[in-house]
Amino acid sequence: REEVPPGEGSHGGILPVVSLVKGFAENPRPKGTPPMTPRLPEHYQSFRRRYPRVAVAHESLASACHDAGPLAERERRLVKLGIAVGSGDEGGVHAQVRQALEVGVEAEALRHVAMLAIPTIGFPAAMAAVSWIEDLLSRRAPAKGKDQGRAGRS
């Protein structure tokens, strides 16, 4: 395996970039560690196979940013969803909803993010975000409690 030593390359030594073995394209995490999402979108898996060094660098940067501050996991997931909503990124909203659900963020909190966006990005854009959030909520198994029966509603 080829390693790029710290200080070399455009990363300035901040990110140790490693060209990993073929298995990286399927699962970049250490053996025994579950992936963040059960199934990554095919276009991203293809990107990882084609450009493993770039994918490693991106995932390293994302991880470093994720852990750089005082926000708890739940707060980070809601903030990242808000960023995706605000940027109008449907794929990003889908990814952030999946990741938020995986760490136990409740459906009503995800919906609230879209409601908070109305005065900032406008009603039509926020309603698009609501539909993207509901796309993912409608695919999951019905939850017990107040979210039950609401997943398919737009």
Image (cartoon, rainbow, N blue to C red):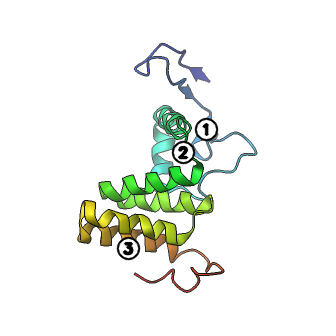
Q: Amino acid at mark 3?
A: Ser
Sequence order check: which comes first, mark 3 or mark 1? 1
Q: Quadrant of residue 3?
A: top right
Q: Which mark is residue 22?
A: 1
Sequence order check: which comes first, mark 3 or mark 2? 2
User: Which callout, 3 or 2, points to the residue nearer the camera?
Assistant: 2
Give whichever of 117, 40 is nearer the camera. Answer: 117
Q: In x, y percent, where is residue 30?
A: 70, 39
Q: In x, y percent, where is residue 27?
A: 62, 45
The residue identified by callout 2 is 71
Instruction: Determine the secondary structure under disc 2.
Output: loop
**In screen coordinates, is 129 left or right of 106?**
left
The residue lying at 55 percent from left, 23 percent from top is 16
Q: Amino acid at mark 1?
A: Lys
Q: In x, y percent, where is residue 45?
A: 51, 50
User: Which callout, 1 or 2, points to the residue nearer the camera?
Assistant: 2
The residue identified by callout 3 is 131
Q: In x, y percent, where is residue 37?
A: 59, 56
The residue lying at 46 percent from left, 40 percent from top is 50
**In screen coordinates, is 119 left or right of 62?**
left
Q: Which quadrant: the N terminus? A: top right
